[in-house]
Image (cartoon, helix red, strand yellow):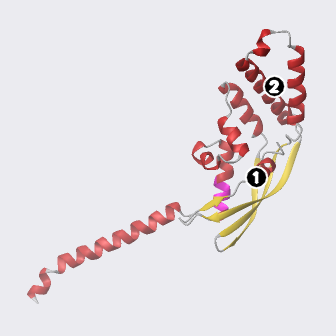
């Protein structure tokens, strides 16, 4: 009996250690685990806030790459992002999940940017034609800066027009194997999210 008691502190320490390990693993799982609805919500919030940590995972998407890597003065880029997301909101209506795939049905409201590229093409053409005799037109950096300014101006006009578009989008996801979900974001889907830009 006396010999058994001397092992009691070791047994108690082992049990406490195992309990602590189990609790730590459970809390770690709870910290990183998410539902498909939470994943869609996190992505759309990060898009609106231009969160670089989230956006860098989707750089193969032409729209996200454009938003994150446009070169130019910061003021113009900030104006563009402000205009793009001025009227942006969304509502996750429902999420369907089966095994390791899920789809979120989301209603996205934003400014209508469907005519921005046509307006930009015309405005940039007019600018070049009106300034062919000036030296600045041959300066690549100055021309790029002017084209960005024209593009931002067209996005701002569309945002300020008050014309709103509402798109129903279906955001597909796959289980990432680590208690989370990866969004599958195609260029077509992103165009719908951004008001048909």
What number is the disc on residue 55?
A: none
Q: Are marks 1 and 2 in contact (CB under 8 Å)?
A: no
**Residue 27, x across and y down, in percent:** 45, 65
Q: Which mark is residue 150?
A: 2
Residue at (19% x, 76% y) in the render: 10
Say which residue appears at 73% left-offset and 15% top-offset.
Answer: 139
Q: Nearer the viewer, residue 67 or 28?
A: 67
On screen, 160 above or below 104? above
Disc 2 on helix, strand or loop? helix
The x, y position of residue 73, in whole percent, is 67, 24
Q: Say if 69 sits above or below 14 in the image.
A: above
Residue 26, picture quadrant? bottom left
The percent coordinates of residue 141 (x first, y second) are: 70, 20
* Residue 108 placement (x, y as % from top left): 79, 52
Work out whether mark 1 precedes mark 2 in sequence or the reverse, and give the earlier one: 1
For image coordinates 71% across by 54% down, the residue present is: 185
Residue hosting label 1: 90
Q: Which residues are magenta?
A: 37-42
């Amino acid at each position: 009996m006396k010999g058994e008691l001397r092992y009691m502190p070791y047994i108690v320490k082992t049990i406490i250690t195992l309990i602590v390990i189990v609790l730590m693993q459970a809390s770690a799982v709870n910290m990183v685990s998410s539902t498909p609805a939470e994943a869609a919500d996190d992505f759309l919030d990060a898009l609106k806030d231009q969160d670089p940590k989230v956006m860098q995972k989707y750089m193969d998407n032409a729209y996200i790459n454009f938003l994150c890597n446009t070169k130019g003065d910061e003021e113009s880029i900030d104006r563009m992002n402000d205009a793009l997301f001025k009227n942006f909101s969304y509502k996750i209506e429902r999420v369907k999940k089966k095994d390791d795939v899920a789809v979120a049905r989301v209603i996205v409201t934003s400014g209508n940017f469907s005519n921005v590229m046509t307006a930009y093409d015309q405005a940039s053409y007019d600018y070049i034609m009106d300034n062919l005799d000036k030296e600045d037109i041959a300066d690549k950096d100055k021309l790029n800066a002017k084209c960005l300014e024209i593009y931002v101006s067209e996005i701002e006009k569309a945002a300020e027009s008050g014309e709103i578009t509402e798109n129903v989008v279906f955001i597909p996801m796959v289980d990432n194997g680590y208690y989370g979900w990866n969004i599958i974001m195609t260029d077509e889907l992103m165009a719908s999210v951004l008001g048909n830009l």
